[in-house]
Amino acid sequence: ERYALLANALSQRHGAQVILVGTADGRPRVEETMLDLGVGVVDFSAELDLRVTAAILARCDFLIAADGPLLHLAAAVGTRAVGLYGPTQGRVLGPYGSDQRIVQAIAQTAADDADSAVMSRIRVDDVLAALEMVI
């Protein structure tokens, strides 16, 4: 639901068109997100090969994604990005470049480091602020 809140805010604040990309594994999350979207969306999730995804990202103004290869692909094709990191260290594993930003969730306990639920600590406002630094 927070991805949907983010997409809705980007559309309202900046007139952003939302495009969804990703793997088949992420498809259930995409479907959940689409339930809460109040804006139009172009859904390319789970339908593309790497070259097509790279071509789509190259035409985008920016990408917002959780830790993974899409962030590095965006950096490789020159697309600005905000990477969302929970249990992994974004400063170490994230893409490099002046157009790349990282939003790192902070674990409250040592046990949280291994828990993907730490991602829930990333606030929509923090992601918007990071994005507005690169657009």
Image (cartoon, rainbow, N blue to C red):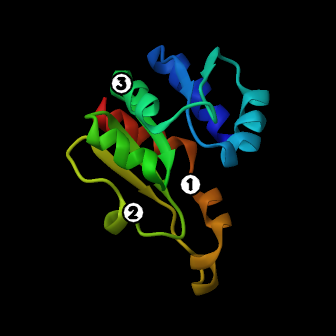
The x, y position of residue 89, in whole percent, is 42, 69
The x, y position of residue 9, in whole percent, is 56, 26
Q: Which residue is mark 3?
A: 61
Quadrant position of the N terminus in the picture: top right
Please, which residue is most extreme toward the bottom here? 110
Q: Which residue is mark 2?
A: 90
On screen, residue 63 versus residue 38, left or right, reads left
Q: Is label 2 in contact with label 3 (beta carbons under 8 Å)?
A: no
Q: Considering the numbered disc 2 on the image, is that residue within a helix, a strand or a loop?
A: helix
Q: Which mark is residue 122?
A: 1
The x, y position of residue 10, in whole percent, is 51, 25
Residue closer to the observer: 104 or 35: 35
Marks 3, 1: nearer the viewer: 3
Q: Which residue is drawn at the image coordinates 61% and 24% (left, top)?
A: 8
Quarter assignment of residue 54: top left
Q: Which residue is drawn at the image coordinates 51% and 16% (left, top)?
A: 17
Mark 1 to mark 2: distance in Å?
A: 13 Å
Marks 1, 2: nearer the viewer: 2
Q: Considering the numbered disc 3 on the image, is that residue within a helix, a strand or a loop?
A: loop
Q: Amino acid at mark 2?
A: Gly
- Note whether 77 is above or below 61 in the view shown: below
Q: Of the two numbered discs 1 and 2 on the same chain, state the one appearing first in sequence.
A: 2
Q: Amino acid at mark 1?
A: Ile
Crowding at dot 3, Cα within 10 Å, few <14 / some 14-19 / many 20+, comes out as some
Mark 3 to mark 1: distance in Å?
A: 22 Å
Crowding at dot 2, Cα within 10 Å, few <14 / some 14-19 / many 20+, comes out as some
Q: Amino acid at mark 3?
A: Asp
